[in-house]
Structure formats: C-alpha cells, structure tokens
Image (cartoon, rainbow, N blue to C red):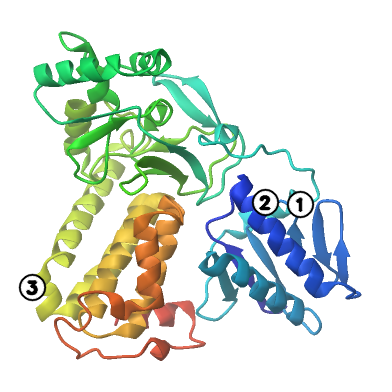
C-alpha cells in the first residue's frame, strides 16, 4: 500500500516542434539536476529513477500523461524534485496531486498505463503541421459520406486540428448570399475552389453555393452571424454525444478541434453543434439548419431511455436559466450555487465524457456567484476548474483559457469582485486541506 503522488500534464503536449523543444529543455534540466545520482538511469527512449515504483519520463513529450509513484522512503525527492522542475518549464500545465488530498489527478489510470507502455518504443509520430494530419485519416463513413477517423489513439485535451477558414460569410437572404459567395469564390485559388465545391450540399436547387455553405459552415463563435468554411474541419460529422469540441478564436481567426475524451484508433472523430435540446426540437433544428437527420446512438435510444435523456436535457436548460438570472445570484447566491451543484451531476449523467465544454461554462458561472459575494477561496477553485476545462477543449492559447487562468491566479481581478456583497468574504488560503473528495465538494458548493 502507499500514497501515490506526482503530476499530470494537462493538456498533454503535442508532437509539434514547439512542444518538443520545450520538453527537450526540461529533460536536459532533469539530467543536469540528477546527474551522478545512483538511481538515475538514461535509456534509449526514456529516463528512469530506480526507486519506489521506478517512475519514468519519455524522451518524446507527446507521450507523457503522468509522472508518479507510490511514496516511500527514497523516492520522495525524485517525485517532488521532477515535479518542481516540470512546473518551472510548463507552469500550470503541470497538475500536481497527492492521492487522498484535495488535489486530483486528471487522467484515467488505464489510459496512463497504456501511455507508459509506449515509453520504450521508438517515436513513430510526425511533427504536427498546421493540420495535424498524422492524427487522422479521411474515410468514407457508412451513411455519412466522408469523415475523419483517428489514425492513432488520441488522448483527451489533444489538439487534433487548427485550421483557418477559406471563406467567411454572414447570414443573409438566399439570393444575396449566392451572389456574395460567387464573388468570394472567384477570388480564391483553384485548389480552394475545388475544396469548397467538393463539400456536401444538403440543399440542392436554385442556390448551389448557398446550399454548400448552409450545410457545412460553422459559426465564428457562439451566436455569431458569421460562418466559416474549412476544407478539413467541415468533413467532421455530427453526433449528439461527440468525442471532440470545436472552438473559434476571434483573436487568431482560426477554428480548433480538441479531443474531449480518449479517442481510439479507428474511431470516427465527431463534434456537436446543437443546443442541447430534447430529441424532437433537436431533430427539427438539425434538419432546418443543416439538412440532415441525426442517427447517432443518443437519437436511436429506446423510447424510454430517450425520454429520460429528454428530461435531463430540459432540467439542464431550466437550471442553466436559473443560474444565469442575476437577481437570483444577488438575492439568493446559496440557491444559485446549489443549482450549479445539481447541474454538474445532471450534465455528467447526460453527457458523460463530453461534459467538459459544459463544465467549463458551469464552473465559470459558479466562480461569478462566489466572487460577487467576496468568496475568494471558492472562486479560486472554480476558476482553476474552469481553466482546466477550457485548456482541454480549447487549448492553452485560447483567449478564454488565458482569461480563466488569470482569475485562478488572482480572482480579485474580476470586475464583479464584491459587487453584490461581502457576506461570503474569504481568503484564497481558506480552502480546506486534507478533506476527502466528497467533503471538499460539499464545502465548495456550500452543501
């Protein structure tokens, strides 16, 4: 027996040149720090500490999910020493944890054990390009046309694609949109014209360009009136229970796709762009807006299970509306925080591993409730969780991820600090130490 301790790399590093250079600098730092130590070993593809459970670090950074060991006499200095060096190089991307305390590890142990098996193998990956084509292949998918299929196992938080649109257009009447698209297409290269015209059209008829745009465009942000066309991202098929998340960066003017749960080699990569509606409303929205009927496993559940799913989705909508009501937040913040607690459990039950994007928003809502009443201790925890979730589904370079990180470091920076009251006044250091997970959650949500 014993207590496990170490760190998880969240999100995991890519195989791109930038991340690998950072990892190599870290490895050189580790080698220099532990040079001459009798338990320190350098192998062809990894380094190892012959103490405790023989914790290892791969020489290729994209392989690492966790560095840890059960604590026992002798191994502690290596676990905490390497963790300290990793924090120096990768900052808050290094999630430190000690089993049994309020710190929580990020990755599932099965996934971690599989990653450790790769450490002794020569690196087979190719450096990431603007489109990380090494991670997926384009295949014909039964009943769906072309789609993206994972070429290798993809871990949660991995950036699968980063792509700029070849064409942008706003919502407008069909005739005007057709003329606008025709003008924009003439200005594109022949290759980009072919990419646009090769996309599916679920609205054949009088306006072919508009039909392609309407079928494939993704909004440039939540509720945006402008949509974009992407040669590769537009091939990703829809699911009501997807394994990836799309996000538009208005700052960088590109769309990213991140894995929000582990994706196995051979599995289709999918995203969702519905509004979390019940089955009938969802079906109508997808048919009207995108011209198809979804046949994913959620939409084809037996009637009783589908009705249970619909009930959960309606509860999610009701709780979300209640939480977003500023009057409730001001007059009864404890109820608003309880609604967040209820919403968290329903979201996990309904969406399972895809709940990460929804949790990012939920944790920020909870942060705003706490900070508006002066509760820095809880606000800091919620900001950390919102940051972790944003990093997984949007990446460290996302403006929203960076914003959540700034609030985690100093929640006082938020414009609503103490705006409603200071009746929950606390300091960042006031969070409980040593409580179990259930006790910590009850404290966090004031249950």
Of the residues under marks 2 and 3, which one precedes in the sequence?
2
Of the residues under marks 1 and 2, which one precedes in the sequence?
2
* Label 1–label 2 contact, CB within 8 A: yes
Name the image quarter holding the N terminus.
bottom right
**Residue under circle 2?**
63
Q: State the mark number for residue 119.
A: 1
User: Looking at the rendering, which quadrant does residue 208 occupy?
Assistant: top left
> Can residue 334 be seen at all in this image of the molecule?
yes
Q: Give the spatial CA distance, label 1 vs label 3.
A: 54 Å
Rendering coords of residue 111 (x, y %): 62, 53
Q: Residues within 10 Å of mark 3 (few under 14, many from 20)?
A: few
Rendering coords of residue 362 (x, y %): 29, 63
Q: Nearer the viewer, residue 444 or 251?
A: 251
Rendering coords of residue 253 (x, y %): 34, 42
**Residue under circle 3?**
327
Q: Nearer the viewer, residue 5 or 437?
A: 5
Residue 19 drawn above or below residue 76: above
Q: Nearer the viewer, residue 176 or 161?
A: 176
Label 2 or label 3, whichever lies nearer to me, is 2
Residue 70 drawn above or below residue 362: below
Rendering coords of residue 399 (x, y %): 36, 56
Of the residues under marks 1 and 3, which one precedes in the sequence?
1
Q: Secondary structure at mark 3?
A: helix
Name the image quarter holding the C terminus.
bottom left
Q: Is 9 left, or right, of 214 in this rendering?
A: right
Q: Secondary structure at mark 2?
A: helix
Q: Residues within 10 Å of mark 2 (few under 14, many from 20)?
A: many
Residue in the image at 82% along x and 64% along y? 48
User: Looking at the rendering, which quadrant does residue 87 occupy?
Assistant: bottom right
Q: Residues within 10 Å of mark 1 (few under 14, many from 20)?
A: many
* Label 2–label 3 contact, CB within 8 A: no
> Can residue 55 be seen at all in this image of the molecule?
no
């Amino acid at each position: 027996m014993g207590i496990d301790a170490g760190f998880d790399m969240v999100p995991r590093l890519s195989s791109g040149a930038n991340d690998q250079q950072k990892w190599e600098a870290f490895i050189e730092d580790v080698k220099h720090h532990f040079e001459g130590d009798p338990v320190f070993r350098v192998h062809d593809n990894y380094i190892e500490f012959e103490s405790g459970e023989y914790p290892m670090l791969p020489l290729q950074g994209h392989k690492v999910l966790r560095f840890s060991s059960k604590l026992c006499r002798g191994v502690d200095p290596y676990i905490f020493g390497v963790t300290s060096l990793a924090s120096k190089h990768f900052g808050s991307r290094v999630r430190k944890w000690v089993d049994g305390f309020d710190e929580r590890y990020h990755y599932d142990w099965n996934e971690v054990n599989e990653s450790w098996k790769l450490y002794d193998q020569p690196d087979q990956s190719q450096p990431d390009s603007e489109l990380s084509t090494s991670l997926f292949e384009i295949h014909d998918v039964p009943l769906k046309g072309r789609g993206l299929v994972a070429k290798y196992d993809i871990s949660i938080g991995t950036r699968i694609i980063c792509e700029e649109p070849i064409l942008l257009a706003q919502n407008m009447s069909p005739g005007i949109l057709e003329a606008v698209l025709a003008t924009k297409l003439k200005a594109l290269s022949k290759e980009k014209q072919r990419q646009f015209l090769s996309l599916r059209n679920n609205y054949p008829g009088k306006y072919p360009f508009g039909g392609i745009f309407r079928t494939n465009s993704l909004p440039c942000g939540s509720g945006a009136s402008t949509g974009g066309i992407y040669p590769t991202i537009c091939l990703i098929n829809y699911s009501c229970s997807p394994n990836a998340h799309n996000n538009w960066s208005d700052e960088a003017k590109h769309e990213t796709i991140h894995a929000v749960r582990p994706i196995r080699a051979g599995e289709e990569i999918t995203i969702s762009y519905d509004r979390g509606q019940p089955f009938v409303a969802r079906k109508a929205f997808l048919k009207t807006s995108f011209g198809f009927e979804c046949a994913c496993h959620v939409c084809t559940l037996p009637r009783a299970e589908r009705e249970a799913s619909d009930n959960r989705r309606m509860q999610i909508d009701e709780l979300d509306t209640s939480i977003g009501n500023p009057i409730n937040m001001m007059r009864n913040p404890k109820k608003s925080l309880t609604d967040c607690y209820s919403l968290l459990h329903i979201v996990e039950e309904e969406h399972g591993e895809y709940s990460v994007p929804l949790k990012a928003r939920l944790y920020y809502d909870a942060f705003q409730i706490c900070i508006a009443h002066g509760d820095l201790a809880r606000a800091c925890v919620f900001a950390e969780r919102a940051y972790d979730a944003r990093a997984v589904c949007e990446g460290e370079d996302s403006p929203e991820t960076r914003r959540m990180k700034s609030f985690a470091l100093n929640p006082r920076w938020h414009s609503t600090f103490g705006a409603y009251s200071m009746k929950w006044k606390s300091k960042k250091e006031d969070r409980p130490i040593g409580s179990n997970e259930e006790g910590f959650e009850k404290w966090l949500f004031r249950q």
